[in-house]
Image (cartoon, rainbow, N blue to C red):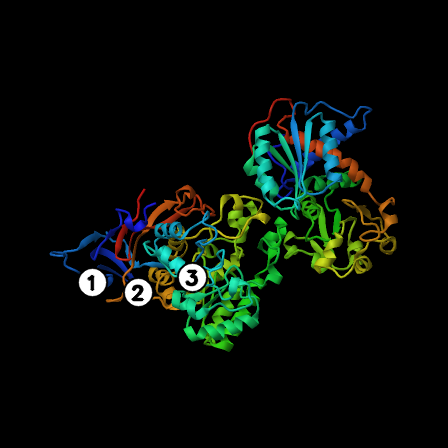
């Protein structure tokens, strides 16, 4: 199958067929990762820049590793948006990219739509590594891959996303990706963390974690940004944990197997009980491994290399 | 640089006959095939006129629309302070290209238009231009929401209204004092209705679209609660309140009810708020970012209803030039505001008149006699003996917006490439005849 997109800006609008193709490609790269020498020459000669305008360790390392495993040349650019006047850096950086003949740009930025802005400035393929509260498509894909590994078919699977939905790009990419794959999605968290008209997504909404657990096969537990407390969005960590913390006790009450995902990094004892994060129901480490494979697949599919080795034409 | 008045195309004519016009009288609500004679800056005759022996200039209007010169009661000319984005002169050129003969610049300049000196400076800058400039002065010093400006001196210097536009008047307390004080001069307070505690940090309308895009939202209630506050303070003080750039269905309903209660409240809507809804933000193009934000389609429908039933008195553009450097950035980081002067008439015709939402005289009234009456300007009417300024436009001509051809110093329009209907043909203003440049 041809993959006809020029950029990966978000999972909104992706079809089941497209996602399946990315995940299948990722599976074949996952096999590469298990080899004694986990490296292929697929992207030799391609230049990739990782533009990180927001602090990120996991996502950046995962992308860097994926690029190295594919033999691409990559350079890193990190700048904290707080240290420079917003907007200036991205625009200037875009001009530099154009001059340096870069093939792919991986961008993480605090502003929703920053990757879209970049597509209007440069010719390179753009991969969104997280833009504000908008999307984090490779995270969404790795979550889908992790669930597919375990459940095979995602159709009808009940996945609840728990936490600060309003400010979460992971939540949005999960909603779009899961719904495209036929899964049922629910959102759970305090009302102040629920975005306006969240129901328009066609998701279930729970304000009671026990009801949510009762409903769900999978909990995707989001990291709580502790600073939100000071913005008046929730009263305290203690109250959050008491009302929405995912604990062993709560899972035992439900008397069924629950699978747990978490995009990391974990606030142990806040959104999830420490012991539970390391337990048999947690797929957190599988997510990390799959992250590299998924990013390899995305880089490869957007690199302009077609599966028969010739350069891919056309735009989308 | 030559001033506009020195331009050869722009002749001083004491006596001028407009022949074969479709004369729109906004007060009577009529449109009649007729001729118009202007002499000594005043309307001399309106009716069938025998041109034989007429010793002035004759302009053949060819059935195009002739109406009082259009007034835009809400613009930002960026002078003083941001002359790189717009000046009184470049703003006047944009106004002319849009068919306006009068504009009212808002006081959120740098420094704020809060003294008689700055009002005088703006009036002076406009003296030789074809467009009349009626400054709106700040309600509070530096628009800081604390102390009243010298409103008496400001009115004397030429301020036609007061506003802290860009912000609402900060508190109900200072608004009350301002409204009590301003009653002595019988000029309105124009309010930018936004409760900052609800809107702070927001970049677009809070809706299903903001939820989808992950952009921080500005809820409609931010506007609604301030409109409600202002209406009650106006009712209490008896002052005249004009709501700037109304954008929510609730706010329109609040104004509708307030008018029924007999409170002195009027309001305006911008062309973009009756044309666009927040779905367009999906492109993350910052030319769709302004205050108030583009709302939902239900709100757009409420704007059309309000225009139709007369709740919305005025169409004003909120012309807000911004430099490319500032505007072409990530959506979150971009400043609020878009251009309006040069696309307003085309949008009014395309969106309101041609689809039959407003009649031609109704639409013209919202850009002439209504703003003139709110601001007590001696213009905007077609009465014999009244001061004459005239806009002539072709109501049916189709044209395409090309941002590189705009007269404004800035280019931040969301309507680049749009096909609009209706465009200025010529203006008569300040005793001069200016035929619009045709392409």
Of the numbered discs 2 and 1, the one sitting upstream in the chain is: 1
In terms of image quadrants, where is residue A311? Answer: top right
Q: Position of residue A220 (x, y in %)?
A: 76, 48
Quarter of the image that includes the N terminus of chain B: top left
Q: Nearer the viewer, residue A127 or A83?
A: A83
- Is disc 2 in contact with disc 1, using a CB cutoff of under 8 Å? no
- Name the residue that disc number 2 marks: B381
Residue mark closest to the camera, 3 vs 1: 3
> Label 2's element?
loop
For marks 3 and 2 on the same chain, the one whose residue lies earlier in the sequence: 3
The residue wearing badge 1 is B47
Which residue is at the front of the view, A125 or A175? A125
User: Residue sitting at 37 percent across and 59 percent down?
Assistant: B123
Q: Nearer the viewer, residue B284 or A73?
A: A73
Q: CA distance from mark 3 to mark 2?
A: 30 Å
Q: Nearer the viewer, mark 2 or mark 1?
A: 2
Q: For numbered disc 1, what is the local secondary structure?
A: strand
Callout 3: few (<14), some (14-19), or many (20+) C-alpha neighbours within 10 Å?
few
Q: In the image, what residue occupies the spot 28% across and 47% down?
A: B7
Image x and y of residue B257, in percent: 49, 72
Residue B76 coordinates in the image, percent (x, y): 45, 55
Tell me if I can see residue A26 in this picture: no
Q: Give how far across and how far down residue B307 sits, in percent.
A: 43, 63
User: Which residue is at the far front?
Assistant: B117
Q: Is residue A68 left or right of residue B218?
A: right
Callout 2 crowding tier (Cα within 10 Å): few <14, some 14–19, many ≥20: many
Counting residues from the start of the chain, the first of labels 3 and 1 encountered is 1
Disc 3: which residue: B117
């Amino acid at each position: 199958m041809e993959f006809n997109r020029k950029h990966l800006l978000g999972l909104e609008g992706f079809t089941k067929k497209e996602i399946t193709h990315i995940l299948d490609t990722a599976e074949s790269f996952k096999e590469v990762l298990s080899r004694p020498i986990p490296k292929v020459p697929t992207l030799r000669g391609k230049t990739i820049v990782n533009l990180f305008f927001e602090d990120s360790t996991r996502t950046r390392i995962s992308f860097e590793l994926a690029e190295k495993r594919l033999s691409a040349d990559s350079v890193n650019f990190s700048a904290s948006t707080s240290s420079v006047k917003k907007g200036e850096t991205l625009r200037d950086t875009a001009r530099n990219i154009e001059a340096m003949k870069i093939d792919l740009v991986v961008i993480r930025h605090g502003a929703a739509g920053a990757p879209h802005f970049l597509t209007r400035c440069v010719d390179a393929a753009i991969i969104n590594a997280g833009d504000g509260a908008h999307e984090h498509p490779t995270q969404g894909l790795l979550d889908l891959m992790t669930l597919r590994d375990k459940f095979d078919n995602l159709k009808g699977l009940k996945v609840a996303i728990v936490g600060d939905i309003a400010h979460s790009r992971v939540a949005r990419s999960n909603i779009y990706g899961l719904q495209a794959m036929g899964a049922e999605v629910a959102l759970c968290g305090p009302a102040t963390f629920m975005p306006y008209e969240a129901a328009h997504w066609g998701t279930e909404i729970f304000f009671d974690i026990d009801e949510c657990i009762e409903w769900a096969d999978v909990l995707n537990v989001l990291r709580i940004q502790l600073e939100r407390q000071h913005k008046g969005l929730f009263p305290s960590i203690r109250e959050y944990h008491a009302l929405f913390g995912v604990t062993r006790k709560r899972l035992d009450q439900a008397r069924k197997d629950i699978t747990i995902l978490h995009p990391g990094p974990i606030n142990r004892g806040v959104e999830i009980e420490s012991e539970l994060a390391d337990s048999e129901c947690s797929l957190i480490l599988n997510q990390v491994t799959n992250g590299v494979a998924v990013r390899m697949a995305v880089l490869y599919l957007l690199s302009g290399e077609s599966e028969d080795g010739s350069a891919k034409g056309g735009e989308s | 640089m030559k001033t506009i008045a020195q331009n050869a195309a722009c002749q001083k004519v004491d006596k001028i006959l407009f022949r074969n016009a479709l004369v729109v009288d906004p007060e009577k609500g009529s449109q009649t095939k007729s001729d118009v004679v202007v002499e000594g800056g005043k309307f001399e005759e309106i009716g069938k006129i025998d041109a034989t022996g007429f010793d002035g200039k004759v302009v053949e209007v060819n059935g195009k629309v002739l109406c009082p010169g259009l007034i835009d009661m809400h613009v930002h000319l960026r002078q003083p302070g941001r002359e790189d984005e717009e000046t009184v002169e470049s703003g006047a050129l944009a106004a002319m290209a849009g068919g306006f003969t009068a504009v009212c610049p808002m006081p959120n300049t740098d420094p704020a238009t809060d003294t008689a000196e700055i009002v005088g400076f703006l009036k002076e800058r406009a003296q030789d231009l074809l467009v009349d400039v009626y400054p709106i002065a700040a309600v509070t010093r530096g628009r800081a929401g604390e102390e009243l400006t010298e409103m008496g001196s400001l009115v004397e210097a030429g301020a036609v209204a007061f506003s802290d536009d860009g912000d609402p008047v900060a508190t109900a307390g200072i608004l009350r004092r301002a409204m009590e004080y301003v009653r002595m001069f019988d000029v309105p307070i124009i309010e930018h209705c936004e409760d900052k505690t609800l809107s702070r940090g927001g970049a677009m309308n809070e809706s299903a679209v903001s939820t989808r895009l992950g952009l921080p939202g500005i809820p409609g209630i931010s506007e609604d609660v301030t409109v409600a506050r202002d209406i009650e303070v106006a009712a209490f003080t008896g002052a005249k309140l004009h709501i700037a750039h109304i954008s929510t269905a609730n706010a329109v309903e609040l104004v509708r009810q307030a008018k029924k209660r007999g409170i002195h409240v009027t309001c305006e809507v911008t062309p973009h708020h009756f044309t666009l809804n927040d779905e367009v933000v999906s492109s993350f193009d910052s030319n769709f970012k302004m205050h108030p934000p583009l709302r939902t389609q239900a709100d757009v429908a409420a704007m059309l209803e309000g225009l139709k039933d007369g709740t919305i008195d005025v169409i004003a553009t909120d012309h807000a030039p911004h430099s490319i450097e500032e505007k072409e950035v990530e959506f979150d980081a971009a400043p609020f505001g878009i251009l309006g002067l040069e696309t307003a008439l085309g949008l009014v015709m395309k969106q309101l008149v041609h689809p039959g939402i407003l009649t031609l005289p109704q639409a013209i009234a919202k850009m002439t006699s209504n703003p003139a009456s709110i601001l007590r300007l001696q213009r905007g009417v077609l009465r014999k003996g009244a001061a004459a300024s005239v806009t002539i436009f072709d109501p049916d001509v189709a044209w395409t917006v090309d941002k590189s051809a705009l007269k404004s110093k800035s280019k931040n329009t969301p309507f680049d490439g749009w096909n609009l209907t209706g465009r200025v043909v010529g203006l008569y203003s300040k005793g001069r005849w200016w035929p619009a440049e045709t392409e």
